[in-house]
Amino acid sequence: MECRHGSGGQAAECRRPVTGRSGSPAVLPAERRAVGVVFIANGIVCGTFPSRLPWIAERLHLSSGLLGLVGLITSIGALVAIPLAAQFVHRAGPRAATRVLIAGSCLCGGLPVFAPDLAVLALIMLVFGALLGTVDNAMNAQAVEAEQRIGKSIMSGLHGLWSVGVLIGALASSLAAHAGLDPRLQFTITAVVTAAGGVIATAWFRDSRPARAGRKAEGPARDADTAVPRFAWPRGPLLLIGLVGFAAIFVEFAANDWAAVFMHWDLHTSEAAAALGTSVFAGSMAAGRLSGDVVVRRTGPVLAVRTCGVLGTAGCLLVAIAPDPAAAMAGFVLIGIGVSVVVPLVFAAAGRSGPSSAIGVAGVATVSYGAGLAAPSVMGGVADLSSLRIAFAVTSLLAAAVAAGAGLLGRKSGAAEGQLALAEAGASEVILEEDQFHR
């Protein structure tokens, strides 16, 4: 039992961890570790693909504009799937949905290197993007419910483990390129290992759906009969918070997807050295997220996010003027720190605000992941018109927007500010629910 001592003669306030119907508080750390394994597996797949983009581009003779088109198609798949995923994840439950989707996304992530031409690559990436968007909803929904059961912030740490996965994928790609390993063999091994690890980890997930036969589930479980709209869209303050997430994810996508290409094309490094650009970005983002829960509790979300926005802006500008690989890597380190805690804070707030964690995450993710749709086309288009240096200079404006919008993440949850409007396309009905979770 967790107790907080009162002041001025007030009685101490105690809160017992919520355990649910499937176990005791002792099993909660096991669930947290299991969710972390899924985040790592997803991160490894996401870090492997961009690190070998130079090889894919040279094999298929793709320009920066065509690479941007491939990224745009991937984002379209994700963005279309995210709002639709809410129904599947809510009905099946985050546990069952994550088990299926982590396997599908990891296995699909092994296919891009086998594409014989641009058309097949585009089709693979469309499906891959849809699977990534859906599994993202499922694993974040499970993470939000685990956070509620544990009773303290764990979202930043879990997203930190995702960044660790990206780092592992990028470093493995760098080593594979240095050793001359065929990317097709590397991607096959990565796909099988991550899919198996993710599926096994879901065995320790807690099923928060209400019990059958009239038994009421404990904890943060939501009613399975809750109306689930076809399209989830946040309104009011949560829409603005979603836009902060949009800016942060734009910067993250720009660095993650284009670091290796920038190092190889603009600074003329080897493929192995180019992959290190993605590695240092992922490593710094992981460090920021792994320490983020402690930092946010001490400084508050506003100061933490504002500082991150300033660092991200400086990093983008440093990359834009970098005279050598060392300076560029320093810039990617600053960008990684700059985006580290923003997205976890946005998703945690979203998941606690809707009728279910799946619907809440989907609502804000629809806005935030719009950056994934914009970033590839903006980066590739600006690079074709001028250079990747100018593209990173443009990205610094989005990082500055994160700093400017930091105050939105310090708003208190309440009837006016902790609600999520879920509107069906073409309908005016809105479902509102007050945020009941307090740290």
Image (cartoon, rainbow, N blue to C red):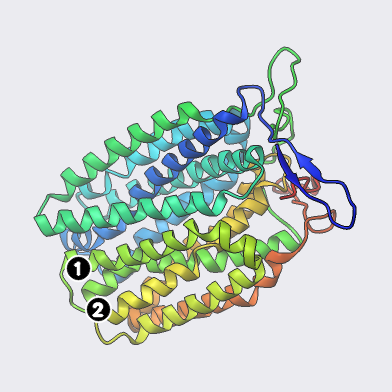
Task: Tell whether 398 sits left or right of 325.
Answer: right
Question: What residue sits 78% from the left and 41% below the top?
Answer: 14
Q: Residue furthest left?
A: 180
Q: Is residue 275 above or below residue 181?
A: below
Q: Is residue 64 above or below residue 179?
A: below
Question: What residue sits 33% from the left and 46% below the top?
Answer: 124
Check disc 2 and report its element: helix, strand or loop: helix
Verify CB contact (< 8 Å) between mark 2 and mark 1: yes
Q: Is residue 370 above or below residue 37?
A: below
Check disc 1 and report its element: helix, strand or loop: helix
Task: Give the distance between the C-alpha atoms of the residues marked 2 and 1, in whole angstroms.
Answer: 9 Å
Image quarter (top left, top right, bottom left or bottom right) of the N terminus = top right
Task: Tell whether 362 sits left or right of 133.
Answer: right
Q: Position of residue 290 (x, y in %)?
A: 47, 56
Identify the disc placed on residue 322.
none
| Closest to the observer, 374 or 336 | 336
Q: Around disc 2, counting alpha carbons within 10 Å, would you say few (fewer than 14), some (14 to 19), or many (20 or more)?
A: many
Identify the disc placed on residue 273.
1
Residue topped by disc 2: 325
Q: Quadrant of residue 140?
A: top right
Label 1 is placed on what type of residue?
A: Ala
Choose the circle earlier in sequence order: 2 or 1: 1
